[in-house]
Image (cartoon, rainbow, N blue to C red):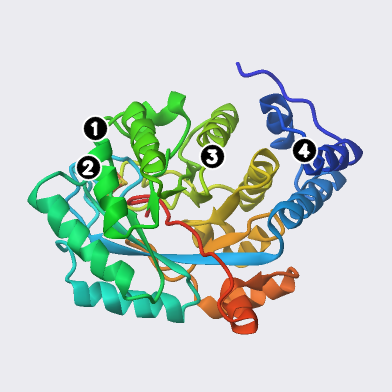
């Protein structure tokens, strides 16, 4: 049995937020307690108010937006249990294709920019990019993509098996490499057996060593315990990504997790808020699955302290129109990067990509 968490009071949560703003670090035990707050209670109100104060203190009030493009879709060799593109899934409700031509990537860049995104991540469904003709082709495409200047060129190309490959991708022009840890180390074996957590950590080491920005988060609601959710957040804190995309499981028919219920909206929002307390100065992005999980409460991701959203569609499912995010940001006293750029003529840094095949 996991240890029973004690319920934190509104006053103690407010004091915790004050401490984090002053430089304290939230412990795993404190984080576990925060996950227990009763929805609608004074403690929950204090949790969300604190999450917003922490975000505003460390990151300001600009919302970063990014998009992803499924640059090579389907027939993946890996068996990630949440993913429509995984080997052995019966899911066929998306278009499979080989690596897209440069023209299609250019069109997607224009469309991402029009949607308010400042970065576009090219996501490929495979184990990882292989040295040789495949890496040559990919680097040539990244070079053209990065030079078109519409959005920042990010990639999400799976496992890297050497520093050489990471360096080539960086030299080709990739600014940020997206590579999710997905979940806690202790739960990873439940969702994927074709590659290891260690391979993911090694990939992250290569990304950082190459000097690329790191976008790394994961998916919650896959059946992990609350303790494992905190373990995952601690691991993310350890690797220090520039951007942390948090996806919520969108159970897709035909996948191994297709029968799981979506996470309750209150639990999802509380989880985001607790991640804000644990990662006070990191960019945290509400990514895939937020629509099906939060429904009409989607805009509340900003009340939970996130400062980034994925705009446009996901890999195999639909997203939310950019207009919605402009209104939602404004409702919560925030401003989208795109609006900032219109005001300040080009300011704003964009964000990293979501996880490979996360939806
Ligand atoms: S998440 Fe990525 S690596 Fe895993 S099955 Fe899907 S496309 Fe393949």
Residues packed near mark 3 inside 10 Å, few (<14), some (14 to 19) or many (20 plus) = some
Q: Which residue is mark 2?
A: 127
Where residue 161 sits: x, y (%)? Answer: 24, 35
Q: Quadrant of residue 140?
A: bottom left
Where residue 357 sits: x, y (%)? Answer: 32, 51
Residue 23 disc label: 4
Q: Which residue is mark 1?
A: 194
Element carrying mark 3: loop
In the image, residue 133 above or below residue 115: above
The C terminus lies in which quarter of the figure?
bottom left
Is the CB of the residue bearing disc 1 within 8 angstroms of ligand 1? yes
Give me the C-alpha separation between circle 2 and circle 1: 9 Å
Residues packed near mark 4 inside 10 Å, few (<14), some (14 to 19) or many (20 plus) = few
Is the CB of the residue bearing disc 2 within 8 angstroms of ligand 1? yes
Q: Tell which tag, 3 or 2, sits nearer the viewer.
A: 3
Label tally: 4
Q: Which residue is mark 3?
A: 240
Q: State yes or no: discs 2 and 1 in contact (Cβ < 8 Å).
A: yes
146 left or right of 152 in image: left
Residues packed near mark 1 inside 10 Å, few (<14), some (14 to 19) or many (20 plus) = few
């Amino acid at each position: 049995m996991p240890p029973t968490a004690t319920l934190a009071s509104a006053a103690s949560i407010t004091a915790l937020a004050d401490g984090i703003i002053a430089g304290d670090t939230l412990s795993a035990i404190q984080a576990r307690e925060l996950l227990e707050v009763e929805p609608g209670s004074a403690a929950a109100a204090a949790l969300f108010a604190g999450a917003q104060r922490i975000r505003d203190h460390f990151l300001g009030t600009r919302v970063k937006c990014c998009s992803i493009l499924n640059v090579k879709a389907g027939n993946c060799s890996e068996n990630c249990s949440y993913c429509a593109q995984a080997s052995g899934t019966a899911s066929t409700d998306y278009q499979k294709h080989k690596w897209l031509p440069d023209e299609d990537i250019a069109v997607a860049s224009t469309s991402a920019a029009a949607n308010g995104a400042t970065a576009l991540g090219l996501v490929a469904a495979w184990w990882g990019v292989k040295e040789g003709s495949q890496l040559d082709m990919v680097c040539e495409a990244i070079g053209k993509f990065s030079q078109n200047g519409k959005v920042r060129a990010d990639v999400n190309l799976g496992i890297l098996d050497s520093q050489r490959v990471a360096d080539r991708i960086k030299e080709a022009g990739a600014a940020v490499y997206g590579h999710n840890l997905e979940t806690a180390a202790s739960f990873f074996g439940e969702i994927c057996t074709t590659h290891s957590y260690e391979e993911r950590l090694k990939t992250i080491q290569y990304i950082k060593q190459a000097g690329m920005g790191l976008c790394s988060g994961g998916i919650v609601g896959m059946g992990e315990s609350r303790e494992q959710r905190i373990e995952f957040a601690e691991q993310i804190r350890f690797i220090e990504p520039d951007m942390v995309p948090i996806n919520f499981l969108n159970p897709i028919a035909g996948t191994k997790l297709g029968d799981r219920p979506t996470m309750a909206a209150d639990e999802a929002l509380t989880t985001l808020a607790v991640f804000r307390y644990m990662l006070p100065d990191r960019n945290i992005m509400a990514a895939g699955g937020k629509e099906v999980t939060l429904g009409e409460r989607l805009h509340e991701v900003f009340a939970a302290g996130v400062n980034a959203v994925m705009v446009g569609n996901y890999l195999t499912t639909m997203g939310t129109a950019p207009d919605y995010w402009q209104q939602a940001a404004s409702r919560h006293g925030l401003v989208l990067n795109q609006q900032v750029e219109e005001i300040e003529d080009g300011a704003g840094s964009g964000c990293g990509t979501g996880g490979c095949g996360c939806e």
